Image (tube, helix red, strand yellow):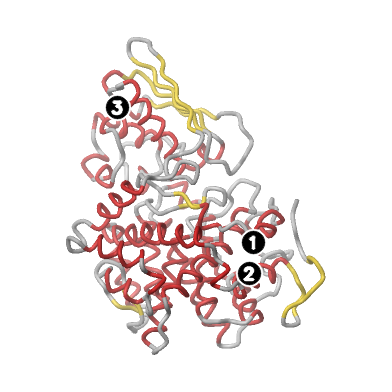
Amino acid sequence: MALDGMHNAGSMGGMTDTAETILLRHLLATPEAAIPESARDAARIFLLDGLAVGVAGMAHAARPGLLAAARGWGAGAEARLWGDGAALPASHAAFMNAFQAHALEFDAIHEAAVVHAMTPTVSAALAEAERLSGLGQPVSGARFMAAVILGLDLACTIGAAARGPMRFFRPATAGMFGAYGAVARLRGFDLGTASAGAGLLLGQIPGTMQAHTEGSMALPVQMGFAAMAGLRAADLAAAGAAGPAQWLTGPFGFLKLTEPEHDLVPGLAALGSTWQVARLSHKPFPSGRLTHPAIDGVQRLIAAHGVRAEHVSAVRLYLPPLAMRLVGRPIKPDLTGNYARLCLPYVVARTLLSGRVGLGDFSEALLRDGPTHALAARVELHGDGSTDENAVVPQRVEIELRDGTRLDQRVDAALGSPENPLPRVAQIEKVKACLAGILPEGRADELIRAIDALHEAPDVVGLADILV
């Protein structure tokens, strides 16, 4: 059921109560005290994860060139980049940090929405907080957390309304609303100004699926565009510019354009009772989330049966439509890291060979490793016959051994999901692996302590200090 146009009679600030105003009122008018501690706990967990992954993204080969380009867009030192501390105008820093956070396919995801909402939201919010601090308007940790949580509600509610196959790169297209929402909340916009800025996002929609099809480094660039769009729309709205009022549900609004099959009703009904930050999933492996159930299934079979790569005759994966479209791609000889992270045969082969998939599994040497390619060629991909165009699970792994034995594992909740959460010890191990070799030893523990006490911090800019 699509929800377009008007809702219940009522108004706020003279504006009719439409889907757009319901969402913006939730974003702007929800008191910090109304956010439950469970949502704050989840925000601390995924803020730690997102910042650590953003630091690790410094290692992407395209990063130096992008930084040179970003410096050429204009001078300024409002916010810093995670890792080396290079200072840029806030929108440019948000672009770079969002690029870094998605560059290694290691950032958290909202599975129902298929949106990496934390990446553009936190990148824009922390850049804005640094900018405000530089103007003598410090942002407290509690205020920052509320802006991030409510920005995530905006992005994930919009993303989860989709009912059809992904036509645009939803992590960026829906993700930009999270970036904008967090900045609008931090700036204290009224409903009219926030609506004006949200409409100005329409002309900045970032995200072609062609980049995903090709495994292009344009994917994390598009996440950078999403973060930058949020700040630019806020700047324009503050200057008096205004976009279309029906930016979400209009005949040429966001949903009709990018998600023509949609249903906003459940998401709107859940506002204030279901907090989307608590529905995020960790990514324990630096590869596309749709590869994770298969990796998880292979690991379970290794643990239960002692499977070794040399014993494997064939691997058969039975996948929902989304996995077939996004990561059901063949192995090829000239692999790049961007392509391999979205290639099920490659990551399954690496799991069988090493028992896991880590940052080191996408080195130049392993991307061309003969045994990995030979094993990947024995991985078969099959549709499971389901019709849900946005489901991540279930996925089923079948391994046939050379002696004829067949082993089978169904995964209904991938490791890292709310139904099968990543243990705290594994969360910390991931953070330390992301920071290793980039930040000084001990900085991970400092970051953990700072985020645990963030609700007491008078100025969130201290987080940025730890990241450089």
Q: In this figure, which residue is indicated by the disc labeled 3?
A: 374
Q: CA distance from mark 3 to mark 1?
A: 49 Å
Q: How many marks?
A: 3
For residue 177, say whether it is visible: no
Real-space Cα separation, disc 1 to disc 2, in angstroms: 7 Å
Near mark 2 (Cα within 10 A), the count class, few <14, some 14-19 or many ≥20, is some
Which labelled disc corresponds to residue 271? 1
Can you identify the residue that label 2 sits on? Answer: 26
Q: Which residue is depicted at the point 63% across and 62% down? A: 272
- In percent of width and height, residue 69 lies at 33, 72
**Residue, x 41% and y 34% (percent of image)?**
330
Q: Is residue 177 left or right of residue 415?
A: right
Can you give x and y, in whole percent of width and height, for residue 9 in the image?
82, 70
**Pair 3/1: label in front:** 1
Query: Callout 1, which amino acid?
Result: Leu
Contact between marks 1 and 2 (CB within 8 A): the answer is yes
At label 2, the amino acid type is His
